[in-house]
Image (cartoon, rainbow, N blue to C red):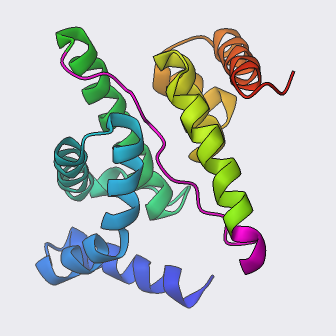
Amino acid sequence: MSQFSVHTDDLLRSCQEGNPSAQMELYNRYYKAMYNTALRIVKDSMEAEDIMQESFLSAFTKLDTFKGEVTFGAWLKRIVVNNSIYHYRKQQRKNEVGLDGVLYKVEDNDVAAEDHGTTELKAQKVLEAMKKLKDNYRVSLTLHLIEGYDYEEVSSIMDISYANCRTMISRAKESLRKKLNLT
């Protein structure tokens, strides 16, 4: 086990004992990634901030349910995604907020610096095309391709059957290809 995860385990034990400085340390480690995850789904910075805060509060109050089967970061990310989807659906019911740009930036750290500009232009083209997808296509592709959830996890998060999830993601990819004229 890496030193970082051992240290995280120590922080988690301290959090369970009610140590506020341990909670702050975990918050400082994870808040940027969790905020960005929420923002990609709800697209509103204030709402993403609220979701991130709520998710940390929820995680700290339910820390006794964390069994260590996945990393703390993955467990926390699941809470953030679930809260984000909940808030997104709630907003849709109110018809207040559309999901016009779930994705706004893709970073590729594996590309050489001289290729970065070309890659960024291609990524921007993909992101612009994704903005034009139906909301359920955009959310499912975000969860699957950007957030890295498998079909089973996406189907659970979106509350649809596994078969419907695979079909939706397949259709979303095909729709994206058409919008990019890659067919």
Instruction: Tell me the chief SS of the magenta region.
Output: loop
* Front-most of residues 54 and 49: 49
- Residue 130 higher or lower than 28, as above or below: above
Q: Position of residue 22 (x, y in %)?
A: 23, 80
| Residue 108 left/right relative to 39 | right
Q: Please tell me which residue is depicted at 21% across the width and 12% down the height of the picture.
A: 95
Q: Is residue 65 left or right of residue 46?
A: right
Quarter of the figure with residue 110: bottom right
Residue 30 is situated, as x and y percent measured from the top left of the image, at 36, 68
The segment highlighted magenta reads 96-116
Q: Position of residue 87 (x, y in %)?
A: 25, 28
Q: Is residue 112 visible?
A: no
Q: State which quadrant residue 133 falls in.
A: top right
Q: Is residue 93 visible?
A: yes
**Residue 103 sits inside the magenta stretch:** yes
Quadrant of the rendering where the N terminus is positioned: bottom right
Give me the residue at 72% from left, 79% from top.
113
Q: Residue at x 87, y 21 (%)?
A: 183
Where is 113 relative to 115, above or below? below
Q: Which residue is located at x 51 percent, y 53 percent?
A: 105
Q: Nearer the viewer, residue 92 or 158?
A: 92
Q: Residue furthest right?
A: 183
- x and y, in percent, of residue 96 in the image: 18, 18
Q: Is residue 86 above or below residue 66?
A: above
Q: Nearer the viewer, residue 172 or 65?
A: 172
Q: Is residue 19 above or below residue 68?
A: below
Q: Report which quarter residue 59 is drawn in.
A: bottom left
Please tell me how many numbered marks the rendered image carries. 0
Q: Is residue 102 magenta?
A: yes
Question: Which residue in the rendered view is the most extreme toward the bottom?
Answer: 3
